[in-house]
Amino acid sequence: MMGYGSWNNMMGSWNGFGLLGWIPMLLFWILLVFGVVALFRYLGGSARNGDKGRSPFDILKERYAKGEIDKKEFIEMKKDLA
């Protein structure tokens, strides 16, 4: 009958995975971290890409049309952009 010591010596250390058993776990955690970072960059980048290709004046006109700024502010900001 084999006791715990005999099983450990026969299969190697670290519960039968041997000395290289930590490599798959390390790869798993690295891939998990990279996946989470890539997901956040993808989701965060989509909001920033919405303003590409539009001029500052176009954004100003859109803000005025939405009612975010009034006519006086629109005229002042338009002068600043010119």
Image: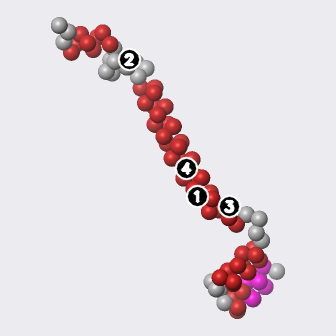
Residue 38 image point, x, y percent: 57, 47
Residue 42 image point, x, y percent: 60, 52
Disc 1 designates what residue? 44
| Mark positioned earlier in the residue sequence (1 or 4) | 4
| Mark positioned earlier in the residue sequence (3 or 2) | 2
Asked where in the image residue 46 lies, by quadrant, the reply is bottom right
The CA span between labels 1 and 3 is 9 Å
* Looking at the image, residue 11 lies above or below residue 53: above
Q: Mark 2 and 1 residues: CB-CB less than 8 Å, in contact?
A: no
Residue 2, which numbered label? none
Residue found 48% across the figure and 40% down from its top: 32
Which amino acid type is shown beneath numbered disc 4?
Leu
Mark 1 lies on a secondary structure that is helix
- Residue closer to the observer: 82 or 6: 6
Disc 3 designates what residue? 49
Disc 4 designates what residue? 39
Task: Describe residue 23's horizontal placement relative to residue 58 as left or right.
Answer: left
Instruction: Find out whether residue 79 is within the magenta segment.
Output: yes
Residues shaded magenta: 75-81
The CA span between labels 4 and 3 is 16 Å
Residue found 68% across the figure and 64% down from its top: 50
Which amino acid type is shown beneath numbered disc 3?
Asn
Which amino acid type is shown beneath numbered disc 2?
Gly
The quarter in which the C terminus is drawn is bottom right
* Looking at the image, residue 60 lies above or below residue 4: below
| Mark positioned earlier in the residue sequence (4 or 2) | 2
Disc 2 designates what residue? 18
The CA span between labels 2 and 1 is 42 Å
Residue found 73% across the figure and 63% down from its top: 52
Instruction: Find out whether residue 52 is within the magenta segment.
Output: no
Around disc 4, counting alpha carbons within 10 Å, would you say few (fewer than 14), some (14 to 19), or many (20 or more)? few
Asked where in the image residue 7 lies, by quadrant, the reply is top left
